[in-house]
Amino acid sequence: LLLLYVIDLQQIPSHFSLCELLNGIRTSGEVEIFPQGKLGTPMVVYCDMETDGGGWMVKLRLRVFQRRKDGSEDFFRGWKDYVKGFGNLNGEFWFGLEKIHNLSTMAKMILRVDLRDGGESVFAKYSTFEVAKKYYRLKVGGYSGTAGDSLSYHNNQVFSTKDRNPAPSITSCAMSYRGGWWYMNCHEANLNGLYGIDVNVSLCLCKGIIWTSWKGKDHSIQFTEMKMRPADFRPPPKK
């Protein structure tokens, strides 16, 4: 049974995190939120209440905004798809740049990237995370974790896709590495690349799901999840 919670962010006291209000604070699930109040445009996010104390919105899964796990979704897409979002919140998905921007600027946010492959699990956490409105420029920094820091390389980069590159100096990166990302001549991380690409060497390396500081550029990672939560979030006390 899938429960959908509806929350008007304008009615939440400032000391509450969105995900703190989800099902007694302890259960992961989908939640429909209204960042500008009930008269604004709603969005559905997935709240992860298990990882690292909970409170995460998942996207590239969190306030999860991204997830890769089985290659079921095509991530080699154009600008409009990446702005709007695509996929299934219960499977692989990209939440959408416009929605990620809205959430990441709603309050000071922390980013967490979870990576799993071959029975190993690592993570990277960033104390600074924001996606700007103009060109969806990435602001990220303050690394800690076990995965190594492959994302700070992309700090201050604009988002590019196969059909749109706001930065002329990186015109071929999205086409060359088969994804939409904050490329910079070209990548140390490429979490929206082709799934399982290292299985077929003839298709060339580095085009897969890459986190260089963990698995190098020759191996496509099996599972990724990007998520954010407010920096002032505090895990609920255990019963």
Image (spheres, rainbow, N blue to C red):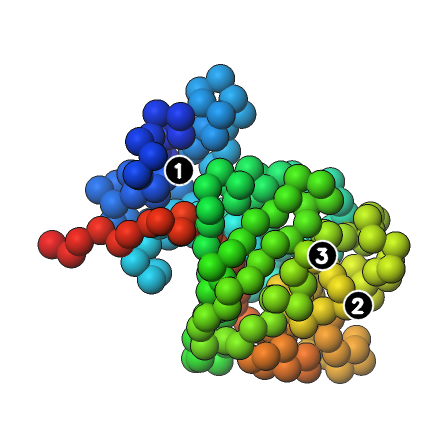
Q: Which mark is residue 31?
A: 1
Q: Which mark is residue 198?
A: none
Question: The N terminus lies in which quarter of the figure?
Answer: top left
Q: Mark 3 is on which residue type?
A: Gln
Q: Mark 2 is on which residue type?
A: Asn
Task: Evaluate if marks 2 and 3 touch, with contact meaning CB atoms under 8 Å apart.
Answer: no
Give the Cα separation between the discs numbered 2 and 3. 10 Å
| Residue 50: % across, % down | 31, 58
206 above or below 20? below
136 above or below 144? above
Q: Earlier in the sequence, mark 2 or mark 3?
A: 3
Label 3: which residue?
A: 157
Q: Mark 1 is on which residue type?
A: Val
Q: Quick one: 90 or 10, which is closer to the camera? A: 10
Label 3 environment density (alpha carbons within 10 Å; few <14, some 14–19, many ≥20): many
Label 2: which residue?
A: 185
Outermost top residue: 39
Determine whether the residue tagged by mark 1 lies in a helix, strand or loop.
strand
Q: Is residue 237 left or right of residue 103?
A: left
Determine whether the residue tagged by mark 3 lies in a helix, strand or loop.
loop
145 above or below 157? below
The residue shown at (11%, 54%) is 239
Whether residue 6 can be seen here: no
Determine whether the residue tagged by mark 2 lies in a helix, strand or loop.
loop
Q: Earlier in the sequence, mark 1 or mark 3?
A: 1
Whether residue 182 can be seen here: yes
The residue shown at (45%, 77%) is 146
Q: Earlier in the sequence, mark 1 or mark 2?
A: 1
